[in-house]
Structures are given as C-alpha cells and as structure tokens.
Amino acid sequence: MNDLDKVEKLRQRANVTYEEAADALKACDGDLLDAMVYLEKLGKVKAPNNTVYTTNYDEQTKYQDVTYTVEESKKADERTLKDKIKHLVEIIAQKLSDNSLRVERHGKEILVLPLWVVALILLFAWYLTIAVVIVSLFLDCRYTLEGKDDMTEANKVMGKATDAADYVKREFDKL
C-alpha cells in the first residue's frame, strides 16, 4: 500500500483531514495502527468504548447455554398463552352466565334459558336444535338475547332471521 492509500484510509477511519492523517503517518513511520493511536492521544479521534480483552477466565463474561435460554423463552411464551386462554375462558363463562335466551310466541314468554344451557344444548344436539329453531320461526316464535351485556347486534341478526321466515310464509301463502 502506497503512502497516498495509507493517508486516505487513515483519513476515513479517523475522520480527520488529509493534512492531519499525513502528519500522523509521518510521525509514526507510516504505520497505520500507530498513527491511529497517535491521533487518539492528540484528541483528534474519539477513543473506542472501553473494550477489554482478557485471557483470564475469571474476568470473562458469563455465557448462558443457548438451549437453556430458548427453553426458558418457550416456557414464558407458554405461560402467557395459558394465561390468555384462561382469561378468554373466564370472559366467555361470565358472558354465558350473565345473559339468557328468551323465546316468545304471540307476545307471551315461552322459555328463558341461560346462555350456558343454550351452549350445552348446541354442543351436544346442534342438528336437532337447528331444526327446532327453524320450525319454531315458522310457528311465529321470536328469539331475543337479554342480560347485562349489550346484545343489540345479535338481536338484529335474530330479527332478520324472523323477518326471513315471515317472508317465506307470506310467499308460501300466495301459492
């Protein structure tokens, strides 16, 4: 490497002028490393952060086993997932116990069931439940949800199902 290349390299690394780089190289007999140290001592270059290299085992940084660290991270993720699932189940259980399904026919209340009972019926006899609901809609039964929570949107959907059954009945009567 010629002198011009050394000056350019030192100038880039030390962020100094060409003149300062050339003077430092001249003072250090062309040695780049010595020139960098020389510029640091003059205060022209910021010294690197305190980095210590040692061969003494006691002074070395303690390292953790990678597999141990990964396993601990997975356990923490599992715990948070378990906590999230537990919280979700608690919310669902609360909503199922705080609300109920009301069935009316011609303005008279026929049946009121807590939503947890409705959920169990749907879970174990969904095929029968769907058939009963469809038939009951054609027999002028109306379904609404009541309770502590705002059920406006769900009741709108059930109202649309009732309207659809009424429309089908009217169309059938026209035949």
Image: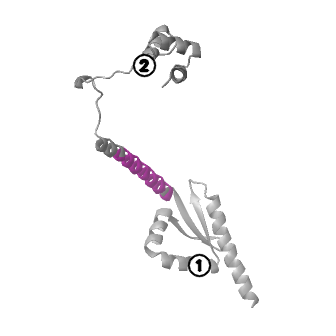
Looking at the image, do the residues carrying marks 2 and 1 touch, with CB atoms under 8 Å apart? no
What colour scheme was applied to this rendering of the protein?
one colour
| Residue bounds of the magenta highlight | 74-96
Question: Where is residue 79 drawn, in percent x and y?
Answer: 37, 47
Q: Earlier in the sequence, mark 2 or mark 1?
A: 2
User: Dividing the picture into quarters, in which one does residue 28 lie?
Assistant: top left
Q: For label 2, count other residues whose C-alpha is less than 10 Å away and answer few (under 14), some (14-19) or many (20+).
A: few
User: Dividing the picture into quarters, in which one does residue 139 lie?
Assistant: bottom right
Amino acid type shown at disc 1: Ile
Residue at position x 32%, y 43% in the image: 72
Residue nearest the observer in this picture, 9 or 15: 9
Residue at position x 50%, y 15% in the image: 45
Alpha carbons under labels 2 and 1: distance apart: 88 Å
Queried whether the magenta region covers residue 84, the answer comes back as yes
User: Please, which residue is most extreme toward the left here?
Assistant: 57
Question: Where is residue 30 drawn, in percent x and y?
Answer: 46, 16
Q: Is residue 111 visible?
A: yes
Question: Where is residue 75 drawn, in percent x and y?
Answer: 34, 46
* Numbered disc 1: secondary structure: helix
Numbered mark located on residue 111 in the image: none
Residue nearest the observer in this picture, 83 or 160: 83
Which residue is disc 1 drawn over?
A: 134
* Numbered disc 2: secondary structure: helix
Q: For label 1, count other residues whose C-alpha is less than 10 Å away and answer few (under 14), some (14-19) or many (20+).
A: some
Residue at position x 57%, y 66% in the image: 102
Amino acid type shown at disc 2: Leu
User: Please, which residue is most extreme toward the right here?
Assistant: 174
Q: On the rendered image, what quadrant is the C terminus found in? A: bottom right
User: Dividing the picture into quarters, in which one does residue 166 lie?
Assistant: bottom right
What type of secondary structure mainly makes up the magenta span?
A: helix
Which residue is disc 2 drawn over?
A: 33
User: Which numbered mark, 2 or 1, is in the foreground of this view?
Assistant: 2
